[in-house]
Amino acid sequence: MPLLQCGNWILEGKSSSAVATYIRIKELDLIFDLGRCPMKFIGTNHVFISHFHLDHYFGLPIYISQRWLAGMPPGNIYVPSSGFKQLQHILNQLSELDAGKSWNYHITPVETGEEIPFRRNLIAHILPGNHSVPAVSYLICEVRNKLKEEYINLSGKEIVELKKSGIQITNEIQLPLVAYLGDTRGISSDTHPLLHKCKLLICECTFLTPEHRERAKKTKHFHLEMLPTFLEQFESEYIVLNHFSRRYTPDLIREVVYNQLPTSEHSRVSLFI
Ligand SMILES: [Zn+2]
Ligand SMILES: [Zn+2]
């Protein structure tokens, strides 16, 4: 299973177009898409599904049933609202067939514009998708409390006094950590004011070569030729490209991607292959 280190985070999983995409960041206790479900992902508590193509959600029954069998509380699964009812129906049929009764599971339908708090200090912003079926993207931010400007020069003792008196001395700020775009024809960085500052951007790059330009357009996938201009919008420290077509070998992917990118981009772009 590929592992990719991005600062303090390790990306684990797999991503190959039409086969399966599942990426875990254990340090954030989350998984983006679940095209298959390796056993070691079962204990991860948050799953964000981008859209209902099989290669992105086919691992859900395993994730749900294995937790149920192990007596664990259900994981928190987030899916685009457009397919929520059908998914429920499928899962209920599967659990009836498998166990003769319903698995215990917890799925939250999400829509663009929503903000979903999870864990103690994280928020998932639901951003629009841009694909051949209804889809969403996710921007994960960390919430922190920052001392207000006017109190910055106070001593620790004075701050404690103010706190005791019930005065609100901090502002809540959000730090954009990871953006996951799912399958996409691209997204404007204006979609959310924090998007262009995300520390890690995970972006698909299904098609690479000129002869697949039209196919990329038709199937609403990203093409490598769009990448240099696209990346100019982002200040991200780490860019991870995933979901390459099976037509290309790993060697060809490396060669073509880094040839297309300006050398100034090489150090921050990694390939999840
Ligand atoms: Zn896909
Ligand atoms: Zn897709």
Image (spheres, rainbow, N blue to C red):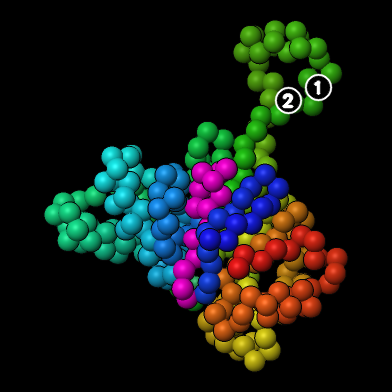
Quarter of the image where one finds residue 201: bottom right
Give the alpha-carbon distance from disc 2 to disc 1, as whole Å.
7 Å
| Rendered location of residue 266, percent (x, y) | 80, 66
**Residue 248 horizontal side relative to residue 33, left or right:** right
Disc 2 element: strand
Identify which residue is drawn at 66% across, 40% down.
174
Amino acid marked by disc 2: Leu
Q: Residue at x 68, y 80 (%)?
A: 252
Residue name at image x 59 percent, y 74 percent: 244
- Residue type for callout 1: Ile
- Does the magenta-highlighted stretch encompass residue 113? no
* Earlier residue among tags 2 and 1: 2
Res 60 visible: yes
- Observer able to see residue 185: no
Q: Which mark is residue 147?
A: 2
Residue at left offset 66%, top offset 53%: 5
Stretch in magenta: 18-31
Cβ–Cβ under 8 Å for marks 2 and 1 = yes
Crowding near the residue tagged with mark 2, few <14, some 14–19, many ≥20 C-alpha atoms within 10 Å: some
In percent of width and height, residue 240 lies at 66, 62
Which residue bears the numbered disc 1? Answer: 152
